Image (cartoon, rainbow, N blue to C red):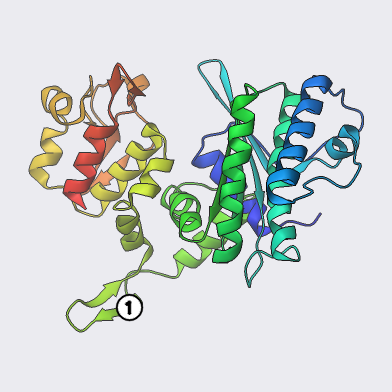
Amino acid sequence: MKIEMGESLFYSWLRHVKECQIVQTNWKVSPQWTLCHEDELEEIRRKTDEYFAKNYGYSIYKKNASLSQIIQQGECDALGISIQDGENKVYAVDVAFHERGLDYGSRGTTVMKVINKCLRTAMCIYGFIGSKDADIYFASPKINPGILQDALPCIEDAQRLMDELGYRFHFRIIANNDFRDTVLNPILLVSGGVADTNELFLRSYQMLSMFDDGKNVKKNERSSDEGSVDVSPNTANIINLKNAETLAELKIGRLAQTSLRILLEEGRVSDEEVMKMQDAEYSKEVFDLAYPVLVRQDSDYNRVRYYCNPVTVNGVQYMICSQWFEVPANNDRPYLLRWIEEHT
């Protein structure tokens, strides 16, 4: 079976960044499935087809293509479902890697292909999964400015049309620096501890990291004033913790577990503060937590409230609190982001 590196990347991204419990790559429509909501889907097809033909001169579906023909061609490179508190969140990704930049033919043809993929995926999700709410991404590490300039307004219009029809699909193009900041950096940041041999992208990255033992660190020259910059994986993690776009992609629990571990292991936290982080009052004041941020592994503590993997600081193993929330009534994210900023 052919395995694409882009699919493997987003398989890991959906699992570890979006925290999807169910992920499938190369998701395709089966002819044996029963299509539901055909009248509503036909309305989507008709309105979007007419809008883009009238306003852009685009024929986003094949000429005279029926709803059935459009749907049966449905597929996406990675589909994920995150289940939280009994509610399902669906994510769908199409990823394209063209070394010289996204290219499906002419400039207009390439833009039409992107619009088609996003809208068709939305119709398939509603028709076969029954969800009107999903995040649908078209991702490419390199899209030339001209194509991106044409595609972004079209995606915004597709979003507006779906909103007007009463759907909650969210379309997004992820490309260029955005691809680096919101996809590549977050997955590398949380890659520690992942040992699934099916995750080829992460396993490749981990293999490369094995050969960086801290003794043969590559250097990049920024300028004569700034000197050389350590680009080892550990330093790259610290740099990623300074990137607001990268941090925004991580859910609060994953962000806390990852950032605390990195900064503690890198010696960015003083011994005095490590002691304070074991105090409930300090943890409440600084992190807005109901429990100490850290407890010694060999102490008597409520294991339900802490992650199971210890972090080692100066030869002592500590457990990190898992009780992080991001809801209007209890939002720990601003507290954690402020602490991260102070220590990077």
* Residue drawn at 72 percent across, 52 percent down: 112
For the residue pair 38 and 246, the one nearer the viewer reads as: 38
Relative to 286, does residue 99 appear above or below in the rendering? below
| Quadrant where the image shows the N terminus | bottom right
Horizontal relation, residue 113 to residue 227: left or right:
right
* Residue drawn at 74 percent across, 66 percent down: 106
Image quadrant assignment for residue 229: bottom left
Relative to 143, does residue 221 appear above or below in the rendering? below
Q: Position of residue 68 (x, y in %)?
A: 90, 33
Give the structural element (helix, strand or loop) at label 1: strand
Horizontal relation, residue 45 to residue 209: left or right:
right
Horizontal relation, residue 292 to residue 129: left or right:
left
Please name the residue that numbered disc 1 is placed on.
Answer: 219
Image quadrant assignment for residue 336: top left
* Residue drawn at 60 percent across, 44 percent down: 155
Image label count: 1
* Residue drawn at 65 percent across, 62 percent down: 97
For the residue pair 76 and 111, the one nearer the viewer reads as: 111
Outermost residue toward the front?
54
Relative to 213, does residue 86 appear above or below in the rendering? above
Outermost residue toward the bottom?
224
Residue 191 visible from this viewpoint: no
Instruction: Classify 10 Å Cα crowding around label 1: few (below 14), some (14-19), many (20 and above).
Output: few
Q: Which amino acid type is shown beneath numbered disc 1? A: Lys
Q: Position of residue 16 (x, y in %)?
A: 51, 41
